[in-house]
Amino acid sequence: MSDDNTTPGEHPVFPPAPTAAPAAAPQAYPGAPAAPQAHPQTQAYPLAPQYPTQQYPAQYPAQQYTPARPTSGLAVTSLITGIAGIVFSWTFVALLASIAAVITGHMALKQTRSNPAVAGRGMAIAGLIMGYAGLAIIALLIVVAIISFLFLGSLPFLLYGVAG
């Protein structure tokens, strides 16, 4: 048994510790701010309020996220080779690039038509158009070269070197 005059289960109550009054600091000049006051060690700061989670009403349904469809690599290839066929139309590279643009463009169109989860139909069509345009430019250059060879006896770019 204890003689501290408490009942079992109770904790003894101690008087608060005496706090020393802070000494007034002398002011360095009139109007200077006072020294900060010391706070007692037993002061506890309030906890942040806990807000309940809010459930959205049924009138605001969750938005359905539809991921972007992957673009067909054949369509991208058709577009790039079609551009290369037009840009390099004065070289031999144009023939190869234009043929590649037409072939990959048709393959990409077939792929996008059979699988709706694959995007790139517009790029495939643009690649096809540029591929066929590149082939038309090459065909036109070949026809001009043949006609000039038949009627002038040589190719047009050789005449400028000889006539000078």
Image (cartoon, rainbow, N blue to C red):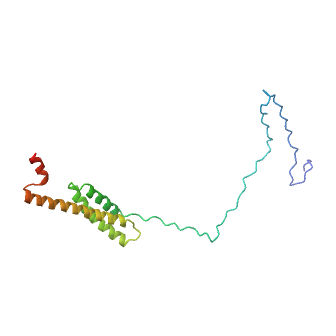
Residue sitting at 22 percent across and 60 percent down?
137
- The quarter of the image holding the C terminus is top left
Instruction: Name the residue furthest bottom.
Output: 114
Q: Quadrant of residue 18?
A: top right
150 sits to left or right of 15:
left
Is 26 on the left-hand or right-hand side of 128? Answer: right
- 44 relative to 86, above or below: above
- Residue 77, position as x, y percentages in the image: 32, 60
Which residue is most to the left?
Answer: 153
Percent position of residue 32, x then y: 77, 31
Determine the residue located farthest toward the front in the rendered image. 164
In the picture as drawn, the residue positioned furthest to the top comes out as 28
Residue 17 placed where, x, y %?
85, 41
Q: Is residue 135 left or right of residue 71?
A: left
Number of numbered tags placed on the structure image: 0
Q: Residue, x 11% and y 47% (percent of image)?
A: 161
Rendered residue at 86%/51% (across/down)? 11
Q: Nearer the viewer, residue 113 or 149?
A: 149
Along the line of sight, the residue nearer the viewer: 43 or 162: 162
Q: Is residue 16 above or below residue 101?
A: above
The residue sitting at 32% across, 64% down in the picture is: 126
Where's residue 27, x and y in %? 80, 28
Image quadrant in which you'd find residue 125: bottom left
